[in-house]
Every structure is written in C-alpha cells, then in structure tokens.
Image: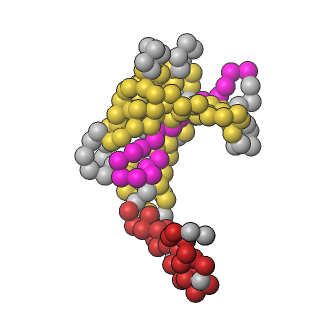
Amino acid sequence: MRGGFRLLRSPRALLVLVCALGTLGPAAAAQERQQGFGRWQVDPRRCELALFGQAPSPCRSLRVDQRNASVLRVSLLTPVPDQELLQEVSFVGERASSGAPLRCRDGVCQLDGSVVLRVRLLRLAQFNPRGLVVGLPKTLPVAGTCSIDGEQAHCDAKTHYGERWSADAQLR
C-alpha cells in the first residue's frame, strides 16, 4: 500500500474507520425521516394516459415520489394491451413551484397544496403480475410540465424528436 492508505495498515485505525462509518447509517435514516422524503399515492376516479403513437388508455394509481427537496417523480400505471403486464410511465423533474408540496413522515406523504414540475425525463418500465420488472426500464430526455392541483393532475412531455406523452387524471 502506498500514499494515503498507509494509515489503514494499522488495525486500530481500521477499527476506528469501520466504527465511524457504521454510525452514519442510522444517522442518515433518522435525518431522512426528519426531512420528509417519501411517497404519496392515490387511485384516481378517472385517468387517461396518451403514449406516443398509441390511442389513449386508462391508467390507475397515480404516485408522487419525493427523494430530495427539489426532484419529484409522478408515476402512473396502465395495462399493456393483450399482455398480463403493467406499464409504469414516470414523469421526472424538478419542482417549479415554491414550498414543500408533500408533507412526509416515515416515508408516507400527504399532498399539501399544489405541485408543479419542469419535466426533464420520462421513464418507462413494465411489470409482471407479481410486480417484478420485465426487461430494462427506458429513460428518455424530454421537456414538459406536470401539475397536480387539488382534484386534477396533468402531465405533458415531448422528446426532441417531437414524440408527445401526456396524462390526465381526476383525483377525487
């Protein structure tokens, strides 16, 4: 070993390093609970997803994931025609609105006001009836918006090739 790894040759130094790293896990988990990251999910009364080149199809289970203070993911599930699969379409972007739209505790969130996103990515994944992903998810760079305000949700995104993807849902 050379350079900066010379200290790790000492068993005492290695033990101190392992103990210090071990305390980071619980501290990070506690901090995450305090900062309010998690998921809000609702089964909309009416939901329609228009995927590029396809007729609009019904969707279900609108979900908002908040992993950090500014990036959110709005996901919808729709059945894949003639297959026993579900397609998850996720609009991913940064918050365009101020304030904290989700009030979270222990990973479970409540919508607190409206959400407006500048959508930058579209993620597509398919799942079998057991909930296991089928194949590799696809991610497309897009430009668009997504908004959830009270009883309505609307997402619209377009690739640089002009392919358009949209979703509309009546939440209550």
Q: Main secondary structure of the magenta part?
A: strand
Query: Is residue 71 visible in this depiction of the protein?
Result: yes
The C terminus sits in image quarter:
top left
Q: Quadrant of residue 8?
A: bottom right
Residue 76 locus on image (x, y percent): 53, 35
Q: Residue at x 74, y 25 (%)?
A: 83
Left or right for 59, reference 148: right
Question: For the magenta stretch, what is the residue range?
Answer: 65-82
Residue 137, compared with residue 12, is above or below; it is above
Residue 70 locus on image (x, y percent): 35, 47
Residue 17 locus on image (x, y percent): 54, 78
Q: Residue at x 74, y 30 (%)?
A: 84
Query: Is residue 109 visible in this depiction of the protein?
Result: no
Residue 67, compared with residue 124, is above or below; it is below
Left or right for 166, reference 137: left
Q: Residue at x 59, y 83 (%)?
A: 10
Q: Residue at x 73, y 21 (%)?
A: 82
Magenta highlight on residue 165: no
Magenta highlight on residue 73: yes
